[in-house]
């Protein structure tokens, strides 16, 4: 029975969405949701396999009369991005997501909603339970830790699946059939710093109120990156006054555009808050960033990074960020992008995290070489990890046209095949299953990877009906 979501056509997928929202499932903490899936399968006499990475494969035999048809795989990831508004007490390791319905919109209480990819998990569970749906043999793959580099998908043993056709339920737009995505790589840059001890006066500069967003899908929307904005502010100040950095911190997830950043500087000079706020607001390009606030407070500190190392940190904060190059052929989307996602300083080092995205491996290598060169020039070290491939399928494949027909049958609307500037597990899975045909589809989800994340309830209803129609006729 539904407790938080009302007025839906198909109750069962929403019941499962409510159910999994009770289970803490931030990336890297998928043990409980994996056990839940295994228990779900056992109660329904379905075969389930869980591996050490907390991936779960559930198999449902074909309905009568379709036993000789080739199997098909439905796939979604169980983890969610754990972001919350400043001051929110929610603990992602223990607390359920608090769901709030506002008409057709579902959101969470000051945290990410987890519709990415909770809607996909919920739809797959509903399909597995419903005995009235006509379908070939189903292989439902629930992968872990997608949001931190497709970790689960990279560790799964694909010899366990028979399917050569796959529907990934991890798109955020109902009117698109995704046939290609970017590859990606993450980079850790570690800069040793000399920390000087003493009793110093200074200022704490805090940036808040930015929208942030998905570092792939939202990277071209003109939204400010809090770290890059802090770099602009500090560079302006450096031209006017002498200071060193005491500490700086901001960002948390590599796949989220950072919304907040805090920096304490050591200086005997005055800093004009009104002037800095006016300067910072001059960089606003997106309406979503109109709530930007730059707060400057006098403070005391017992440490300061050396002047030389302060300059090196400013150099990192001044690099090209966001969209670096656009595709030259349709669809005109970002080809290569970089997100300066995280920064932390401690007694001995500054640790800075980046994520780079590109459709071709050559672009990823380009970004890696740039960051390696930057690191070498300032005496830092780089570590590149969680690399995954891009992917592209034909727009005219049977899988694409079958989904388009099913969507039009359900909604009376057409859906277009397109690419996205984001990472999907389709690329990695395609690299492990020879001749796999794949598409990615989904319902309307907005402001992914931020506490403003919302899902359109009617859209999830529509996509569930489309999945049922698709399986009926594929």
Image: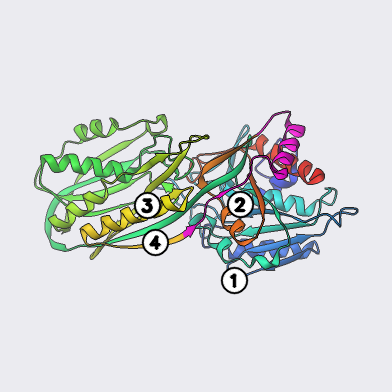
Task: Using a 10 Å C-alpha cutoff, classify the residue at mark 2 as few (fewer than 14 neighbours), some (14 to 19) or many (20 or more).
Answer: many
Is 365 a magenta residue? Answer: no
> Can you tell which quarter of the image residue 222 is in?
top left
SS at mark 2 in the image: helix
SS at mark 1 in the image: loop
Q: Which residue is mark 1?
A: 52
Check whether the beta carbons of the residues at disc 3 and disc 4 lie within 8 A of each other. no
Q: Nearer the viewer, residue 466 or 212?
A: 466
Mark 1 to mark 4 CA distance (whole Å): 24 Å
Mark 2 to mark 1 CA distance (whole Å): 23 Å
> Can you tell which quarter of the image residue 296 is in?
top left
Identified at 26% across, 55% down, the residue is 374
- For discs 3 and 4, the disc positioned in front in the rendered view: 3
Mark 3 to mark 4 CA distance (whole Å): 13 Å
Q: Nearer the viewer, residue 256 or 396?
A: 396
Q: Which mark is residue 384?
A: 4
Task: Using a 10 Å C-alpha cutoff, classify the residue at mark 4 as few (fewer than 14 neighbours), some (14 to 19) or many (20 or more).
Answer: some
- For discs 1 and 4, the disc positioned in front in the rendered view: 4
Q: Which residue is mark 3?
A: 366
Whether residue 207 sits left or right of residue 17 in the image: it is: left
Q: Which residue is mark 2?
A: 21
Mark 4 to mark 2 CA distance (whole Å): 33 Å
- Percent coordinates x, y for residue 453 in the rendering: 52, 41
The residue range painted magenta reads: 387-415
Mark 1 to mark 3 CA distance (whole Å): 34 Å
Q: Relative to residue 102, is residue 16 depicted above or below?
A: below
Residue 234 visible at all: yes
Quadrant of image for the C terminus: top right
The tag earlier along the polypeptide, 1 or 4, is 1
């Amino acid at each position: 029975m539904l407790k938080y979501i009302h007025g839906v056509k198909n109750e069962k997928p929403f019941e499962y969405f409510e159910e999994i929202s009770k289970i803490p499932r931030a990336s890297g903490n998928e043990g409980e949701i994996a056990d839940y899936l295994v228990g779900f399968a056992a109660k329904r006499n379905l075969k389930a396999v869980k591996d050490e990475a907390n991936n779960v494969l559930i198999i449902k035999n074909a309905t009568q009369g379709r036993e000789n048809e080739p199997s098909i795989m439905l796939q979604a990831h169980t983890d969610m991005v754990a972001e919350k508004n400043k001051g929110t007490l929610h603990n992602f390791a223990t607390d359920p997501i608090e769901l709030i319905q506002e008409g057709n919109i579902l959101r969470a209480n000051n945290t990410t909603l987890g519709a990415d990819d909770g809607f996909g998990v919920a739809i797959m569970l509903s399909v597995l339970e419903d005995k009235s749906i006509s379908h070939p043999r189903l292989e439902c793959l629930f992968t872990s830790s997608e949001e931190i580099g497709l970790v689960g998908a990279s560790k799964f043993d694909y010899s366990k699946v028979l399917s050569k056709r796959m529907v990934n339920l991890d798109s955020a737009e109902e009117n698109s059939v995704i046939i290609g995505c970017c590859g990606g790589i993450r980079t850790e840059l570690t800069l040793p710093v000399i920390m000087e001890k003493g009793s110093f006066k200074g200022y704490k500069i805090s940036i808040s109120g930015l929208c942030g967003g998905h570092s792939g899908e939202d990277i071209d929307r003109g939204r400010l990156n809090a770290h890059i904005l802090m770099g602009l502010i500090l560079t302006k100040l450096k031209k006017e006054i002498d200071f060193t950095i005491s500490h700086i911190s901001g960002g948390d997830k590599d796949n989220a555009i950072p919304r907040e950043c805090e920096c304490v500087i050591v200086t005997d000079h005055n800093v004009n808050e009104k002037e800095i706020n006016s300067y910072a607001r001059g960089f606003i390009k997106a309406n979503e960033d109109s709530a930007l606030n730059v707060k400057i407070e006098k403070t005391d500190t017992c440490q300061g990074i050396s002047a030389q190392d302060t300059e090196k940190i400013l150099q990192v904060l001044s690099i090209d960020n966001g969209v670096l190059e656009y595709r030259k052929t349709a669809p005109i989307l970002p080809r290569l992008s970089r997100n300066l996602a995280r920064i932390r300083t401690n007694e001995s080092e500054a640790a800075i995290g980046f994520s780079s995205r590109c459709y071709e491996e050559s672009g990823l290598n380009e970004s890696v070489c740039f960051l390696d060169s930057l690191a070498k020039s300032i005496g830092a070290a780089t570590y590149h990890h969680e690399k995954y491939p891009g992917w592209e399928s034909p727009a005219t494949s049977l899988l694409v046209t079958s989904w388009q027909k099913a969507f039009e049958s359900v909604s009376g609307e057409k859906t277009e095949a397109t690419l996205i500037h984001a990472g999907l597990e389709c690329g990695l899975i395609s690299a492990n299953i020879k001749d796999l045909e794949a598409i990615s589809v989904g319902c309307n989800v907005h402001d992914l990877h931020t506490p403003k994340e919302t899902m359109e309830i009617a859209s999830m209803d529509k996509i569930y009906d489309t999945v049922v129609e698709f399986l009926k006729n594929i």
